[in-house]
Structures are given as C-alpha cells and as structure tokens.
Image: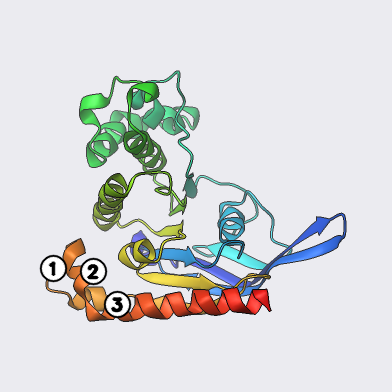
C-alpha cells in the first residue's frame, strides 16, 4: 500500500489572517512535495509560519489560497489519515498509559487493531511496555511524549505531523527522543512532517528540510540531506563530524542571518 502512496503535495498555498488593521499575509505561494515514507522538516526564523503551515496540513487551519493533497486526496478538514503530536504533553491524565494509547482505536471502534495487539506493539516501540499501567503524572516529560507518539502511531496515520515535539525536553532526553523517532519511522515506514527551530535536529531527522522565509512565509529553499546515506554508520557522532553536515549547518545559519537582516531593514 505504501508503494502506491504519492505523499504530501502543496500547490501555491497561502494564508491571510484578518486583523483590526487589515489583512495580514502570513504565508504566500508555498509549493512543496514530500514523498511517502520520508521525513520532512519545516525550518525557518521565528514567525515564518511553520506551525501555521503544519496546522493547515492537519486540517486545523484553512488555507486562503492553493491546494493541499495527501495521497491524491484533498485536505479540507482533520482526518484519520493524519495524526499530530504537539510540543505540550497531550495525554489524558485520568487514563493509564495503555488506555491513552488505545484511546483513538476505541473511539473509532477499530476493534480489529485492538485485538491484533496494535497497542502493545507501539508501547514496545516507544519503550513503555513496563509502564502500561502507570498514569501520566507518574512519568517524566520524555516518557509522556512517548505516550503521545505511541497513541498517534497506533491509529496508523498516513501522515505523522509533529510541532516541535521535543522542544520542551532537556538536551539528553531530546537526543534520545530523536533517535527513538528515527528508529520507529525507519521500521514502520512512516511519512513525517515536523516543525523544528533547531538546525541540528532538522538535519539529523529530516530527509529533506524546507526552509521558510519570514513575513510572509515563503519556501526559500529545499535542502536534501542525502549525504547521510553515504556515512559509514548512522550514529549521531558520525553525523556531527561529517563535513557535509558542517557545510549545511553554516549555510542554514547564513540563511537565518539574511532573513534577520532583511526584516530589520
């Protein structure tokens, strides 16, 4: 089924907000594509509209202009084909870890997936099988975010959306969660679109990075990270020591600086 999927397509997408002083163009003429089974990262200066764009792909915001399609189906509202993880921990405090992960399957009456062990599969995938009967208040921030990831994946979305999901975590936990995410998406072959403000995270997680300009947000550059395929191993140390990584890091920092100067002028 994955082989037949065409992925995510945005064609000339724009967003205008109405304010007291008149219309504000937040996003303008954004066209991009993300192939099925790939990880795309939205990166750019603060205020460029990354989260707004992600919310439009989720169907939580309506675009003013353009077309968004997922596997050739037009996106007009939220749907089961998309699952979203936010930066804030969104577990239900009155439910156990197991019941949190099973929540979507139960409300969608997906009894087959419950019987086939989807909940246990994803609890194991995120390393929470020993905490299945615990409650969110008994877990660390990183573990609560694992619950949110498992709950979203258990619904088998065609597109996995993440809005700075590790931004509130300490560096060590954030690195662990990044590696966890990569391990899951490689095994499950998920398609992921993720918002990040961190250059290292964007290049480490993304197969492709979409760099947005500021005011209004436009797609300034699409940056592929194919160099990672040629590295001798997939460790973070090897990645950080790569000359290709250092060059892209400097290049993106230059883009950030140019955007800052352009908006200050």
Residue 264 shows in this picture: yes
Q: Name, please, the residue furthest toward the right.
A: 21
- Indicate which disc residue 240 carries: 2
State the residue position of label 3: 246
Secondary structure, mark 2, is helix
Q: Is residue 21 above or below residue 233?
A: above
Counting residues from the start of the chain, the first of labels 2 and 1 encountered is 1
User: Residue 166 or 233: which is nearer the viewer?
Assistant: 166
Taking the spot 40% from the left edge, 28% from the top edge, the residue there is 100
Residue 71: image location, x then y, percent: 49, 63
Residue 40 occupies quadrant: bottom left
**Gap between marks 1 and 3 measured at Cα:** 17 Å
Secondary structure, mark 3, is helix
**Gap between marks 3 and 2 measured at Cα:** 7 Å
Tell us which disc is closer to us: 1 or 3: 3
Q: Residues within 10 Å of mark 2 (few under 14, many from 20)?
A: some
Which quarter of the figure is the N terminus placed in? bottom left
Residue 73 shows in this picture: no
User: Residue 12 or 217: which is nearer the viewer?
Assistant: 217
Counting residues from the start of the chain, the first of labels 1 and 3 encountered is 1
- In the image: residue 22, left or right of residue 92: right
Which quarter of the figure is the C terminus placed in? bottom right
- In the image: residue 28, left or right of residue 235: right
Please report contact status of discs 1 and 3: CB closer than 8 Å, yes or no. no
Residue 107: image location, x then y, percent: 49, 28
Taking the spot 62% from the left edge, 71% from the top edge, the residue there is 214
State the residue position of label 1: 233
Residue 219: image location, x then y, percent: 56, 75
Residue 102: image location, x then y, percent: 38, 29
């Amino acid at each position: 089924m994955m082989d037949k999927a065409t992925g995510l397509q945005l064609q000339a997408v724009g967003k205008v907000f109405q304010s007291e002083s008149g219309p504000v163009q937040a996003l303008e003429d954004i066209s991009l594509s993300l192939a099925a089974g790939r990880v795309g990262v939205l990166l750019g200066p603060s205020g460029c509209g990354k989260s707004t764009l992600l919310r439009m792909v989720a169907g939580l915001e309506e675009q003013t202009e353009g077309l968004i399609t997922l596997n050739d189906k037009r996106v007009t509202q939220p749907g089961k084909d998309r699952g979203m993880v936010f930066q804030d921990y969104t577990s239900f405090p009155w439910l156990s870890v197991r019941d949190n992960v099973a929540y979507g399957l139960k409300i969608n009456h997906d009894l087959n997936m419950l019987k086939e062990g989807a909940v246990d599969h994803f609890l194991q995938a995120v390393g929470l099988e020993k905490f299945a009967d615990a409650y969110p208040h008994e877990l660390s921030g990183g573990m609560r975010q694992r619950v949110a990831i498992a709950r979203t994946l258990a619904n088998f979305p065609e597109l996995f959306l993440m809005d700075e999901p590790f931004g509130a975590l300490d560096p060590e936990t954030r690195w662990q969660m990044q590696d966890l995410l990569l391990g899951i998406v490689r095994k499950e072959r998920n398609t992921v679109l993720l918002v990040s403000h961190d250059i290292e995270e964007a290049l480490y997680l993304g197969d492709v990075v979409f760099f947005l300009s500021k005011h209004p947000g436009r797609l300034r550059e699409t940056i592929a990270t194919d160099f990672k395929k040629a590295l001798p191993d997939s460790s973070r140390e090897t990645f950080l020591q790569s000359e290709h990584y250092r060059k892209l890091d400097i290049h993106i920092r230059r883009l950030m600086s140019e955007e800052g100067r352009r908006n200050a002028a």
